[in-house]
Structure formats: structure tokens, C-alpha cells
Image (tube, rainbow, N blue to C red):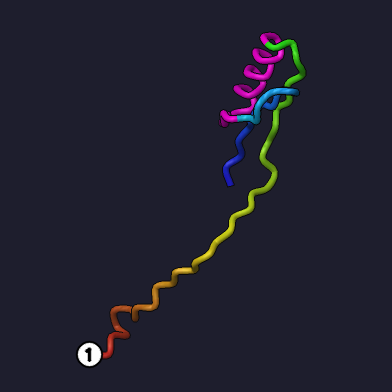
């Protein structure tokens, strides 16, 4: 899992921009807090959940296992 950061501002829309570094997210949080005069939070990924409906498995025999 690749860690990324997002900024949430109280009373505003949900975060939309992913930041690759903590420094980038902190700069954005400061910018938004100053601009909007509201508290901004830096959010960090801690876990990911994925729903996999299909498991695709290659069942072809290897080169020496061919029946002909």
C-alpha cells in the first residue's frame, strides 16, 4: 500500500486531492486554514480495503507438462 495524505477542512467538502508527502499536505492545510479561517486536518492512510469479486488463476500447464 502506498501511503498518501489528504486535507480535510471543517465545514467544507470532502477531501479531493491526494498528497504524496506529509510536507505537501501540511503546506496545503496551512494554506486552506489561512484562506478559509477554519481548522484543517491532515489525514493519513492507515489501512485499505478492497472487494475482489473475481479470482483469475492461470491453469495452463507449464512447458514440460504439455500432454502432447
**Residue farthest along the bottom direction in this orientation:** 67
Q: Which of 53/23 is in front?
A: 53
Horizontally, residue 58 falls left or right of residue 8, namely left
- Vertical placement of residue 47 versus 27, above or below: below
* Residue pictured at 65% horizontal, 27% vertical: 13
Residue drawn at x 63%, y 30% as measured from the top left: 15
Percent position of residue 7, x then y: 66, 26
Residue linked to disc 1: 68
For the stretch drawn in magenta, the main secondary structure is: helix
- Is residue 29 inside the magenta stretch? yes
Residue 9 location (% of width, % of height): 71, 23
Count of labels in the image: 1
Image quadrant where residue 30 sits:
top right
Judged left or right of residue 59, residue 21 is right
Neighbourhood count class around disc 1 (C-alpha, 10 Å): few under 14, some 14–19, many 20 upward:
few
Image quarter (top left, top right, bottom left or bottom right) of the C terminus: bottom left
Q: Residue at x 70, y 43 (%)?
A: 46
Taking the spot 60% from the left edge, 35% from the top edge, the residue there is: 4
Q: Quadrant of residue 57?
A: bottom left
- Give the residues in magenta: 16-35
Magenta run includes residue 26: yes
Q: Could you say whether the residue bearing mark 1 is in a helix, strand or loop?
A: loop
Query: Which is more toward the observer, 15 or 42?
Result: 15
Residue 26, position in %: x, y? Answer: 67, 21
Tell me if residue 52 comes above or below residue 11 in the rendering: below
Residue 31 in the figure: left or right of residue 68: right
Amino acid at each position: 500500500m502506498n501511503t498518501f495524505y489528504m486535507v480535510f477542512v471543517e465545514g467544507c467538502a470532502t477531501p479531493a486531492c491526494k498528497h504524496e508527502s506529509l510536507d505537501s499536505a501540511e503546506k496545503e492545510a496551512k494554506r486552506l486554514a489561512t484562506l478559509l479561517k477554519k481548522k484543517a486536518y491532515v489525514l493519513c492512510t492507515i489501512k485499505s480495503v478492497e472487494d475482489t469479486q473475481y479470482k483469475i488463476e492461470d491453469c495452463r500447464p507449464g512447458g514440460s507438462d504439455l500432454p502432447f
